[in-house]
Structure formats: structure tokens, C-alpha cells
Image (spheres, rainbow, N blue to C red):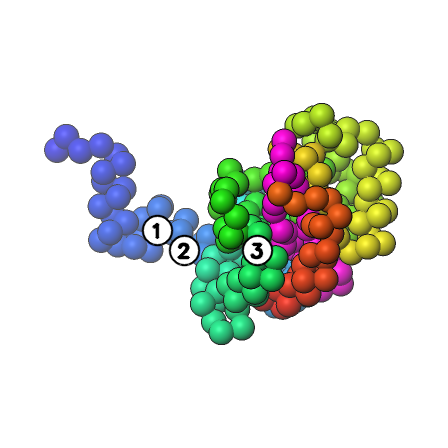
């Protein structure tokens, strides 16, 4: 032996041979599986992903599990798989610079309200922020791109829950519980269910210091094919500058932005 580790040898093989190395082969398989999952007509069955990617079923299942854990793929139940928030986030980064793209829609919402705007995507038990535009106010919120947030305490999260099938929403809430983040967090199913009824009726949700003290948000779901929530968009303020009544006046702008974003996600 020449003193090199097995990892060094494998890395060198990946550079030299590409397809013949274990790492290169795994990467190629992962990329083909991602392409199969992202193909039109999803969510796709495991058997269809396997056939399209030309990867053995056992390997496809194992790679999908890793991609789900990383947020690139989302399990839709019944052995079906769809695009996850991180993959959608990459797509958003690519398309965001277009004249009618995501960035323009969010910028128009920020200008109409003067407040901080977030775009988040839903994956499993959380939402993940993929865009943030700071408002014109003399403060900065602690949120950041890539941050994962609960469903039951956030305006976007509650909007997502309100548009999920009842059994799916129930399973998610049973898995996570309703942990208290502030004194105003809704911690019972009765209170949350009543809130979700209101969200469906009015087309938006309000986080009134339920996730973080002094922070007040209004959010609306971004709906995909069949009305399934892909995520949501929100306007964030602080309680000492914007009242509950005032933030609800942003609802028309918010719903319009959510509708405009839907075909881009």
C-alpha cells in the first residue's frame, strides 16, 4: 500500500473513472431519480420512478429515503413521491430573476405592505423558508432562508394545515403534538381546529404572537394541482407597530400574491 486511505482511493477513482466509482454511480442514480420525481404528472409511484430512472427498486427506495431526509423529495403516501422544498427552492432560485418570476411577485407584495415578506414550502411536519424580503421598517426579524418552522404556530403553517386533507393534517399533528412556543400558542386540537375553519373561510391565517413574542404575521397558502398546498407566503410585522386589524388589511394583496406564485412553484 502507498499510505493512502480507502477514501482517497475511492475519490481518485471517482475523478478518473466517473461511472465506475461507487460515489459517481450513486450520484448519477440520485440525479436520475430526482429527474424522475420532478417529471410532469407527479407525485409518481415508486415503480414508475424506478423504471424512469433505470435504477434497481431497492436502490431507488434507499436513495429516495435519503432525498426525503434532505428535503429534496417528499413522500406523498401510498408509495408516491413528489418534489420536496429544497428542490423547489432550487427551481425558485433559477426562475426568480425572470420578469414575471417569484422575486417580482414578492417584491410587489413587500412594496404594497412595507413589511417583511416570506415564502416557504411545506415538507412533512414543517415549513421551510426559501425567500425573505426585509420590510421598510426599522427592525429585522430573526427568520432566515433555510429555517424550518412548525405548522401549528405560524401563519403559513396554519394555512397549509387548513388545506390538507383532514386525515393527513391529523397525522401530522399527532406526530408533532402542539408544543407551546409562547403564551399565545394554540395547544389544543379544539382551538386549532376552530382556527383552521376560520382560515378556510377567510383565505388567510394570522400568527398573533403564537410563534414568537412581539411578532405578528398574516399568511396564505400557495396551492398546487388539485388544491394541495405547496407552501405559503406571509407578511411579517411587529405588534408594537402594526395592530391585528391593520395587518388583516393586507389580505387582498397577500391572496393575490399566493395565486400568482402558484404556477411558479
Residue ID for mark 1: 24
The question of residue 225 being in magenta is answered with: yes
Please tell me the numbered disc located at residue 28. Answer: 2
- Residue 19 % position (x, y): 33, 55
Q: Residue at x 73, y 44 (%)?
A: 244
- Residue 108 % position (x, y): 56, 65
Residue found farthest to the bottom: 99
Residue found farthest to the left: 2
Image quarter where the N terminus lies is top left
Question: Would you say 191 lies left or right of 249 here?
Answer: right
Helix, strand or loop status at disc 1: helix
Image quarter where the C terminus lies is bottom right
Secondary structure mostly seen in magenta is: strand
Marks 2 and 1, Cα distance to the nearest angstrom?
6 Å
Q: Residue at x 64, y 67 (%)?
A: 260
Helix, strand or loop status at disc 3: loop
Residue ID for mark 3: 114
Q: Is residue 58 visible?
A: no
Residue stretch rendered in magenta on the structure: 213-240
- In this rendering, is residue 183 above or below 162? above
Marks 3 and 2, Cα distance to the nearest angstrom?
45 Å
Amino acid at each position: 500500500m502507498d499510505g493512502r486511505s480507502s477514501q482517497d482511493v475511492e475519490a481518485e477513482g471517482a475523478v478518473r473513472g466517473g461511472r465506475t466509482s461507487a460515489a459517481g454511480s450513486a450520484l448519477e442514480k440520485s440525479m436520475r431519480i430526482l429527474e424522475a420525481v420532478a417529471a410532469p404528472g407527479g407525485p409518481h409511484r415508486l415503480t414508475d420512478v424506478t423504471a424512469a430512472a433505470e435504477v434497481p427498486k431497492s436502490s431507488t427506495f434507499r436513495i429516495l429515503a435519503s432525498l426525503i431526509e434532505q428535503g429534496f423529495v417528499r413522500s406523498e403516501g401510498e408509495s408516491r413521491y413528489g418534489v420536496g422544498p429544497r428542490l423547489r427552492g432550487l427551481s425558485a432560485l433559477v426562475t426568480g430573476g425572470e420578469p414575471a418570476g417569484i422575486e417580482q411577485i414578492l417584491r410587489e407584495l413587500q412594496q404594497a405592505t412595507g413589511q417583511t415578506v416570506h415564502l416557504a414550502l411545506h415538507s412533512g411536519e414543517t415549513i421551510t423558508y426559501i425567500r425573505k424580503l426585509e420590510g421598510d421598517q426599522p427592525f429585522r426579524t430573526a427568520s432566515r432562508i433555510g429555517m424550518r418552522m412548525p405548522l401549528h404556530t405560524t401563519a403559513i403553517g396554519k394555512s397549509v394545515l387548513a388545506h390538507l386533507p383532514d386525515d393527513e393534517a391529523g397525522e401530522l399533528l399527532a406526530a408533532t403534538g402542539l408544543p407551546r412556543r409562547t403564551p399565545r400558542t394554540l395547544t389544543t386540537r379544539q382551538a386549532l381546529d376552530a382556527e383552521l375553519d376560520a382560515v378556510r373561510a377567510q383565505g388567510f391565517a394570522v400568527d398573533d404572537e403564537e410563534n414568537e413574542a412581539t411578532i405578528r404575521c398574516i399568511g396564505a397558502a400557495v396551492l398546487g394541482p388539485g388544491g394541495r398546498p405547496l407552501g405559503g407566503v406571509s407578511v411579517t410585522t411587529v405588534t408594537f407597530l402594526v395592530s391585528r386589524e391593520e395587518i388583516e388589511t393586507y389580505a387582498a394583496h397577500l391572496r393575490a400574491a399566493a395565486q400568482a406564485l402558484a404556477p411558479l412553484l
